[in-house]
Image: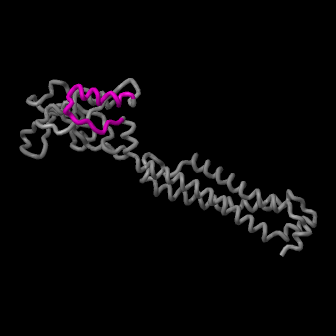
Amino acid sequence: MGPGYFKTMGIPLMMGREFTRADVFGAPKVAIVNQAFVKKFNLGGNALGKRFGQGGGNVANLPIEIVGVSQDAKYSDVKDAPPPQYFLPYKQEERLGYANFYIRTATPPEQMLSTIPALMRKLDASLPLSDVKTMETQVRENVSQDRIISTLSLAFAVLATVLAAIGLYGVLAYTVAQRTREFGLRMALGADGGTVRAMVMMQVVKMAIIGGVIGMALAIGIGRMAKSLLFEMEGYDPVVLTAATFALAVVALGAGFIPALRASKIDPMNALRYE
């Protein structure tokens, strides 16, 4: 890490200082640790000045001094809890194979992407530059699997709704055809079209209620199972369930309206001769 890293990343220091330009190779070795590191190694309320080493060795001669404690922040995966971490100044490394640089700008980050390669060529044309992206893009890539699952879930939900509407329409149309003589007889005895439509729609309501209760229970159960697959998503959301229930009710009533309208226009004489 370089000077100003935590300020650039927006990670506040809980105590101590950031790295400075004086933290170079040959100077006393220093490190900044996060809160999870302090907790894991039980460093107490003030970890400043305490020392640790890398890769074992003599416990009495720990070369790295803690000069700052940073707030916990996400590291390699936005879905995982912040791991215990320590940060070392890159200028104290004897050999540096590669480095990642972060830039904070007051302008839209996308506008900076085209200027960074030109700036790096001016500094040192021999240095390769790769994988230049905004932090927003990096986060989106990190949760790409979750986005794919969400998109597929939405697509399957739309498909299931369409199939449910078609299936419900087919069942009701078949039911109306089977009860043609019954409806004809009722209309011959004085029932009007509105009464027949109400009968069919009542059947739709009963089917929707039974299916809705079963579907709601299954949705909550499956949602809890799928919670671990989606980042920062609850197993179920009352607002979403209410909206879905309303949408399916509209679909059910819409699918039942055409058979109900057809049943209300049955000619009693033709219906009584219907086989």
Q: Is residue 233 visible?
A: yes
Residue 253 image-quadrant placement = bottom right
Image quadrant holding the N terminus, namely: top left
Q: Is 149 placed above or below 169 here?
A: above
Q: Is residue 57 left or right of residue 13?
A: left
Q: Is 8 placed above or below 133 here?
A: above
Residue 50 in percent (x, y) is at 16, 35
Image quadrant holding the C terminus, namely: bottom right
Q: Residue at x 77, y 58 (%)?
A: 258
Residue 166 image-quadrant placement = bottom right
Task: Compare residues 64 and 100 and report the one nearer the observer.
Answer: 100
Q: Is 46 placed above or below 217 here?
A: above
Q: Is residue 257 left or right of residue 58?
A: right
Quick check: is 129 in the magenta stretch?
yes
Residue farthest to the bottom? 275
Q: How is the image coloured?
A: one colour
Residue 90 in percent (x, y) is at 18, 33
Q: Residue at x 89, y 69 (%)?
A: 270
Q: Is residue 123 left or right of residue 214?
A: left
Counting the numbered discs, the total is: 0
Q: Is residue 17 visible?
A: no
Quick check: is 247 in the magenta stretch?
no
Q: Residue at x 85, y 73 (%)?
A: 274
Residue 75 image-quadrant placement = top left
Task: Compare residues 18 and 4 and report the one nearer the observer.
Answer: 4
* Residue extent of the magenta highlight: 111-133
Q: Is residue 7 left or right of residue 199?
A: left
